[in-house]
Amino acid sequence: MPFQSTHGFRRRSIMLLFCAGFMLITTLMISFYTNSISRSLNLSSHHAMSVLSNGEYERFVVWTYPTPPPKDELVAGEILYCSYAPCEPITNEYALNPYYVDPRVLNLKEITKGASLHTFHEFVQKHSWFKMIHGTIFPHHVQSVALLSIVQANPKACVRTLGQHDQIICSHNFHYYNKYNPLKVDSIPPLGAKDLAFTERFGILDYQHRVEKRHKVATTEDEMQSLSALQFMPYMTEFIDQDVDLRNTGGYWFANACWREDIAFPPPPINDFKSIPALIGMHVPVNDETITETFTNNVAYFQAYNNIFGPIGASDMATLDFFLSMGLSSYHSAPFTAMMMVADEGDKSQKDLIIVADVDPSILPSTVVTRAKFLSTILEKSPANKREIRYSHAHDIIIQIAERAKVLVTCNIQLSMIAMAHRVPVIYVVRDGQEDHQRYGNAGLLHLYHEKQEWNFDVENMPPNPGM
């Protein structure tokens, strides 16, 4: 499971035994649960077949998994929907002889809109968080949500999983799944390709070791960046500690992070294709010689990335200039948090909060202070030591900004990007004594939002961000 502790050999051994037992129990529960439902639906599925043969229902076949689909004989009139386009195995043989001629792309965010599908819509909107919660079970939840959403949205629809003809879901047997809730941590997906396993590794950068070294507090900005990267992964298998795990990491991962001192650099060689990074949204504190020397001493790693995958994405112009000075191919990608989407644009009347985050209230007008809700990305060390608390805190702030903020007043780059992604006006405040640090981190970004020089803002009637 993604949330695990990793301290001490004995503790690890106990935890491994516990996890192995938990996985076995979970597997047995999934098997028992899905098999018992299959038995319960046996007669109902036969009835569904007779209904379909009479032409009373529309027939849909769904494949939402991030793997090549199985070969299946579609019945005349069945419409195939896939979440990954094109819905086809990536083989030369298939290109010459396709067996799915015209698959359609399924947009889960759109199909789950509506009051009756609120739970499923929330699951889809906040999929980064639920990938972390559900791990490799997440794709089975997606398939279950897709099947049930189609039937719930269209009472004249019957659906099945591609490759499975023995379990057909229609409106008359939908009630078997009324209690299914993918938002719950212990939820078991009731439908899908039950025997399908996922062996590819997908990890996000983590900072557990760094937090434990700090004396008093920890910030959750890094966790926000990791959550934003998780949007672009099909599921999650592991945390990659930037200071401990990086040299031995494997699988796919995103490098969108602030790269500080003491990182375990470099990762395994690019040419081995055992550790495959996406070097996008990288921030290098260019005034910190420790980290700049680490990178310049390992320029061969970045050159190999350029040769195999292409340019490196820099989150800010200062980092871009640094990569270019190393003779590398690079571009300004901006931070990944600029693409963090967890809410619909929705009803603006619900966005009624003036949120002030990480800003000293003494520098703000009293009219703003009395109206504002104050948030902080900083946690005291005791709760911050727990990984799940840090990510939960980061996610909660993201949700409040996305769903409720009318205006955001902050000195935090990541929060500014999240607000902008959700069309929330940002008043950016440069903290006293940290002008250089924030200028470096914001290089090439300040023009995107309202920067506080003197307070001349009407927070109740803010114009859109200049960068919109």
Image (cartoon, rainbow, N blue to C red):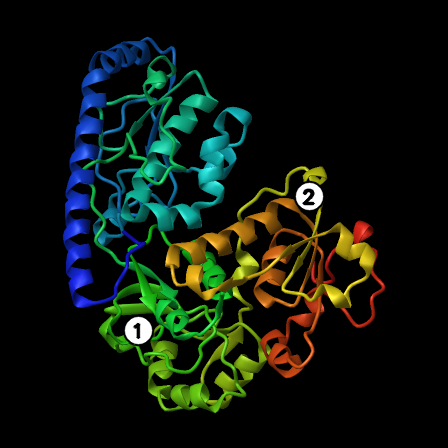
- Disc 2 is placed on an element classified as loop
Q: Of residues 301 and 309, which is closer to you in this image?
A: 301
Q: Position of residue 452 (x, y in %)?
A: 76, 69
Specify whether 13 is left or right of 171: left
Quarter where residue 83 is shown: top left
The residue under the point 30% across, 76% down is: 267
Residue 246 has which mark? Answer: 1
Q: Position of residue 4 (x, y in %)?
A: 28, 56
How far, Cα to Cα, is label 2 from label 1?
40 Å
Viewer can see residue 101: no
Specify whether 455 is left or right of 275: right
Residue 239 to residue 297: above or below: above
Viewer can see residue 176: yes
Q: Amino acid at mark 2?
A: Lys
Q: Position of residue 224 (x, y in %)?
A: 49, 60
Residue 434 to residue 130: above or below: below
The residue under the point 34% across, 23% down is: 177
From the image, which quarter does the C terminus lie in? bottom right
The residue under the point 36% across, 38% down is: 142
The residue under the point 32% across, 10% down is: 51
For marks 2 and 1, the one nearer the N-term is 1
Q: Of residues 423 and 162, which is closer to you in this image?
A: 423
Specify whether 466 is left or right of 125: right
Q: Amino acid at mark 1?
A: Leu
Residue beneath disc 2: 351
